[in-house]
Image: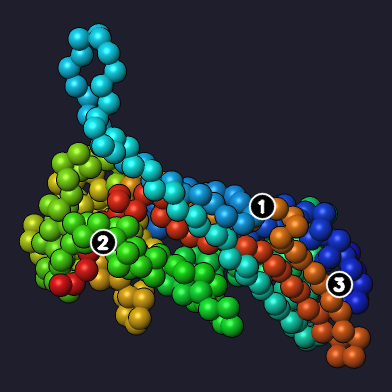
Amino acid sequence: MSTTINISQLASTSLDYAREHLDDVFTEALAPGLDGIAGTPVKPLDYYARSIPGYDEVVLTQVNVTAEIRPSTYDGFEPKVGEAAKISPRVAKVQPIKLDVLFTQQQIIALWKTYYGMKKSKKIDPQTFPFEQFIVKTLTKRVQSDLRKKSLFNAVRNDAGKTALEVFDGLFKKTNDYVTSGLIPTGNVVGIEALTPSNAVEQFEKVLDSLPSEHFYDDLIFLVPRQFKRFYEQDYRKRYGTVPYNLGFDKQEIEGSSVEFCVEPGMATSGDTAFDMGVLTKKNNIVWMYDDESAFRGFEVDYSKRDRSLAFMMDFQANVDIAMTTEVWLPQVA
């Protein structure tokens, strides 16, 4: 393996690698934080969210059947008078997103030295993990991190934007928009007090008490910022002692229920997109949408001879939404 690098040649070989492995590159990039953090409440995204591929629009249809079962005499057809089933189709769209990265010659050389050191220490096999893959993986990790930790919950779409907080409308904006429009029913908005380490147990129980009986034992998850789960743990220990059962983040369910905490490090607790507590919903009700059509995604590499820089450009489409808005409970400070 050579100890030097030809940057102009690297542009060509990197592009060849990306195009040859295009599906793998974008699958990795658009699986934001898919692995989660083992042994913690930070779950893989596919633990609670449903992934739906699509190149433009995704239809999210809500069906509410109001007709009830009734006694039968095995004679005749007697449907409910009026609207027995209400179908509410909603259309969600993936949004165009890009990543533009310019590496200077010095930065490429620094990356190469890191890679070469890993090779010399036998941490990697250059035959199965070439330098081109090392660079592309650096980019896909950044896309993953931005989508999971910034965009998923806190973003607000701005076509002229320059940051990960402007790529699409994240779950904070969507849930609040759905409350305003009535898609999340008024009864699903639960008034709480501002959370502290002294009242968190009471406030979380207040949300559980608002659940209809038919949903209480559903497969529910509570998406919360790390700070608010810490408040719950601290308050719980103060109230009920410090036996091992009450310690650490192993207490992953709200006491007296099967509702599981899912901590999202990217959920804001301050600023314009701050959650007052989090989002309570069913597993697979959060929908992660991404473009799986090659015509709408791209990966390009460009070498500038004048300043010896290397530009990487990724184009893709993604978005997040909610399938059944009537099965979301949103705590808000009254």
The span from disc 3 to disc 1 (Cα, nearest Å) is 25 Å
The span from disc 1 to disc 2 (Cα, nearest Å) is 32 Å
Structural crowding at the residue carrying mark 1, measured as other residues with C-alpha within 10 Å and reported as few (<14), some (14–19) or many (≥20)? many
Amino acid marked by disc 3: Ala
- SS at badge 2: strand
Question: According to the image, label 2 marks what residue?
Answer: 330
> Closer to the camera, 130 or 80?
80
- SS at badge 3: helix
Q: Identify the mark nearer the N-term, 3 or 1.
A: 3
The answer to whether residue 160 is left or right of residue 251 is right
Question: According to the image, label 3 marks what residue?
Answer: 11
| Residue at x 62%, y 57% (from the top left corner) | 56
The answer to whether residue 90 is left or right of residue 110 is left
Q: Residue 292's mark?
A: 1
Q: Is residue 322 above or below residue 235?
A: above
Q: Identify the mark nearer the N-term, 1 or 2.
A: 1
Amino acid marked by disc 1: Asp
